[in-house]
Image: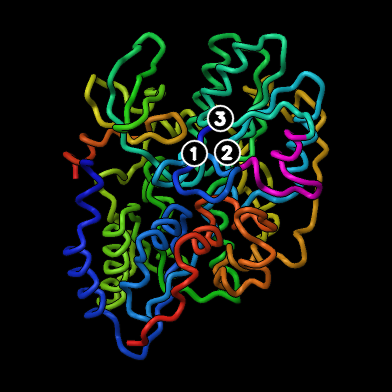
Amino acid sequence: MKFVDEFRDPELGRVLAAEILSLVEPGRHYKFMEVCGGHTHSIYKYGVDDLLPANVELVHGPGCPVCVIPMGRVDDGIAVARREGVIFTCFGDMMRVPGSEGSLLEAKAAGADIRMVYSPLDALRIAKQNPDREVVFFAIGFETTAPSTALTLKRARAEGVSNFSCMCSHVTIVPPLRALLESPDLRLDGFIGPGHVSTVVGARPFEFIPIDYGRPVVIAGFEPLDILQAVSMILRQLREDRCQVENQYKRVVPYEGNLRALEVMSEVFALRPHFEWRGLGFISHSGLRLSDAYAELDTERRFVVPGVRVADPKACQCGEVLKGVIKPWECKVFGTACTPERPIGTCMVSSEGACAAYYNYGRFAREREVV
Amino acid sequence: MSLSAGSTNPFAPACGSEHCITCGDDGVPMVIVALDPERGLALCSDGADRSTVETALVEPVRLGDRLLVHAGTAIAKLDSVLARS
């Protein structure tokens, strides 16, 4: 397929791998974080890390929206879903995220009307087809997904769909990155920036990383050659003693982002004072709620939502995985008590979660040759 | 709901051969095969499946345009950004 095949060329991959090898300084260890779960998935699926020298380490960031949803938020969703007359809709991966008393999928099995949708538009369609029911859309995701929710809410208002509401759990990418950079237990040399979040927000929001923290950022696409080229570009910045935001994914990401998307988001959403992230705790101004102008479509104002707070299970080390402090296989329950079939932690649920990606593609080849 | 090819997990959502389209920072390249300009929607194909896509963020659009689609919304027009870069 156009725009895909060109970026999986094995010959070019070997050229880039050789270039990377020529850029690393022997004896120096490089630690780069791929912010986005989509990158994590591609790295394991295509074996990108096997093409890197052993002293170039990729660590996985917090950029999987399913993985960062805390258990209490799942419990809140289940409480709404169990209400009489409610049809609760959410994305597929969210269905299996464990709450303190089971997942949405288990609540569905117990009788709640919970339906998987592929887009907020699907949820709105269900609302129009069921005018006598209250249809709730459980909105998750970063700035990539938030415009989609915002447009659907505008559409719901324009079409007068009054039985539709949104339980907004959208999050923003910059505050957790700042929290990670402030973390004393993590030393990073550079970032592979999120590709499609940047399609919406542009490159500018990441400039604080080189300016305030002196770390290079390269916004990258999701094909194997994109990721290899991003690694090469970060290494080149370090080699040349430069530190800036570069855009490897120019074919999709404009520097200024998608202004229409930013406009619709600022109309429909407002920042929460703080939002709880799984493993990272409460982070200021990191979550979105519906703005006062859209209050009538806000599930949390339409119904009583318990606002449950639940500590993560003790055995689960998703927090350390999300911060890149440990690798998935270093978690005590990885691949034994916690598997994609029976996840304990969220990182094992989503196909974009570091643990699930590693479990599915990479768990048999852990050792790499030292350069 | 169909199952992912090769999935050992009976509860895994249908994600095709790539990432799950419903979550994460993911986008799917699709081509417009029909337009509904009044409602700001387009019917798009990824070569295998077709779905209704919101086009408000990438207007104006025409038949045959290639879009990057995330969660039912086109977030970029691929040909124009390629031309720009």
Can residue A155 be found in the magenta stretch?
no
Spatial CA distance of label 3 from label 1 is 11 Å
A101 within the magenta span: yes
Mark identifier at residue A117: 3
Give the structural element (helix, strand or loop) at label 2.
loop
Q: Are marks 1 and 2 in contact (CB under 8 Å)?
A: yes
Q: Which residues, given as a range, are shown in magenta?
A: A94-109
Taking B33 as reference, is B19 above or below it? below
- In the image, residue A365 sits, relative to residue A6, either above or below, namely below
Looking at the rendered structure, the secondary structure element under dot 1 is loop
Q: Earlier in the sequence, mark 3 or mark 2?
A: 2
Instruction: Please name which of the two marks, 3 or 1, marks the residue nearer to the observer.
Output: 1
For the residue marked with disc 1, what is the amino acid? Ala
Q: Amino acid type of disc 3? A: Val
**Residue highlighted by disc 2:** A92
Work out whether B29 lies above or below A60. above
Q: At x 44% / y 29%, what residue is drawn?
A: B72
For mark 1, what is the residue? B14
Question: Which amino acid, mark 2?
Answer: Gly
